[in-house]
Image (cartoon, rainbow, N blue to C red):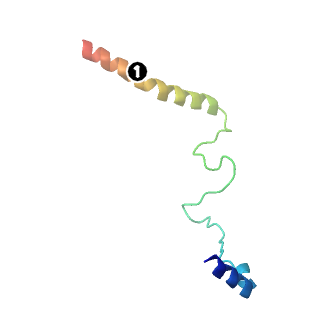
Amino acid sequence: MLSRVGFRAAANPAFIARRGFQTTRAQLSSPYHYPEGPRSNLPFDPLKRGFAIKFWAYCATGFSLPFLLAVWQMKKNQG
């Protein structure tokens, strides 16, 4: 098999140089392609004022909610 590839390459050097790569420009009108670059794929703007407070409030709520619900459920079932 390797000898056949080498024979074809030696017989026709243009065969090796010709590759089937094709590229097309990104279709920005498509709903599935977004602009590229840093922070362009985020659903929020981390550069706005108050982002840190909202972010930490979101994290604290998401972390504490299961524990608070478990405590509430245990108290509800006890009494």
Q: Is residue 12 visible?
A: no
- Residue at the image position 64 percent from the left and 82 percent from the top: 4
Residue 53 percent coordinates (x, y): 60, 28
Based on the displayed image, in which of its 4 quarters is residue 7 positioned?
bottom right
Instruction: Specify the amino acid type for callout 1.
Output: Leu
Residue 75 percent coordinates (x, y): 31, 14
Residue 38 percent coordinates (x, y): 69, 48
Q: Is residue 12 left or right of residue 61?
A: right
Number of numbered markers: 1
- Residue at the image position 62 percent from the left and 64 percent from the top: 28
- Residue at the image position 57 percent from the left and 45 percent from the top: 43
Based on the displayed image, in which of its 4 quarters is residue 21 positioned?
bottom right
Q: Quadrant of the C terminus?
A: top left
How busy is the neighbourhood of tag 1: few (under 14 within 10 Å), some, or many (20 plus)?
A: few
Label 1: element kind: helix
- Is 19 located above or below residue 55 in the figure? below
Q: Quadrant of the N terminus?
A: bottom right
Q: Which residue is more in the foreground, 15 or 39?
A: 15
- Residue at the image position 67 percent from the left and 34 percent from the top: 49
Q: What residue does disc 1 label?
A: 68
Q: Which residue is more in the foreground, 10 or 34?
A: 10
